[in-house]
Image (spheres, rainbow, N blue to C red):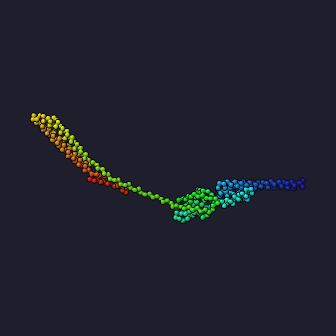
Amino acid sequence: MRDSLPAIVNGKLSRTLLVAAAIASLPLRSARADTKQECLSSYVEAQRTRRLGKLRAAREAATSCSRVECPDAIRGDCVAWSRELETSVPTVVVSVVAPDGSERADARVLLDGEEIATKLDGRAIEVDPGEHVFRVELEGAPPIEQTIVIRQGEHDRAVRLSARPAPPIPQRQAPEPPPAPAPSTARPVPPIVYVLGALSVAGAATWAGVGFSAIYGSPGVKELDECSPRCRPNDRVIVERELDVAGIAGAFALVTGGAALYFYLTRPSSGVAVVPARGGALVGWNAFF
């Protein structure tokens, strides 16, 4: 019993050490598996982005799968791709000319809407090959945009953008006053013409009515001719009175009618002109005879 006890203890201790070693190796195996999976993903991504022309992303993926931890089966391809892409990625050197002709460094540069520089220092900027829209924002000038085709393997290509001066702020101008209207040449009929005309018509109507009664009425001139010399004395007085009234009415009609015609023909030409003025308007009245 005393000889077998140490053997039993040593056996249990050996088994414990083996279990502990196996447990300790589990995280290492898991870490190696994760690294291997990451290397494989980078290997696939390098090929995909390279076919799409995204050389910067392809170079980053190729560099990732070129690590020593990656399997040798893929590491050799990744190292070759990384070296090839290092010379294939094009670069540009952006410069901005201000409206006054001086070069400006305080410019913000965007490539296809993505900011690639906040200040120009003369260094080359990596871009992918293809057509790109460069946009430069410069204080005191409107944004500059220019479309440029960048070729693969092209290095230190100069991209010079010239800023235009900002458009002047339009000033509000006072509206020009409208042209003064031409004076009217109308010749209004004065009221005296209507009054004299009405009196002339009334006189003519009286002349016609009373005159007709004096000639064809009873008694009248024709009746006096037939009864003469046997007419009544009073009839002759009535007829003569009517003839006098008709004569006066006719003369009145001629005078008032002539006066109305005179005032009508000699009426003045008048016009009203409105001239715009500051704070109001000036009204002028002209008359021409």
Q: Which picture quadrant has residue 203?
A: top left
Q: Which picture quadrant has residue 220?
A: top left
Q: How many marks?
A: 0
Is any part of residue 27 visible from this angle? no
Q: Which picture quadrant has residue 148?
A: bottom right
Horizontal side of 62 relative to 259 (left or right) equals: right
Task: Please determine whether, in this image, residue 274 is positioned above or below residue 160.
Answer: above
Q: Residue at x 53, y 65 (%)?
A: 101
Q: Which residue reaches farthest left?
A: 229
The spot of residue 180 in percent (x, y) is 35, 54
Horizontal side of 52 relative to 213 (left or right) equals: right
Q: Residue at x 26, y 50 (%)?
A: 267
The spot of residue 78 in percent (x, y) is 71, 57
Q: Which residue reaches farthest bottom?
A: 102
The spot of residue 124 in percent (x, y) is 62, 63
Pick whichever, 265 or 198, lies toward us.
265
Horizontal side of 43 relative to 3 (left or right) equals: left
Task: Please determine whether, in this image, residue 162 is positioned above or below residue 204.
Answer: below
Pick whichever, 151 or 199, lies toward us.
151
Q: Residue at x 71, y 55 (%)?
A: 39
Q: Residue at x 51, y 61 (%)?
A: 165
Is any part of residue 200 visible from this angle? yes
The spot of residue 261 in percent (x, y) is 23, 47
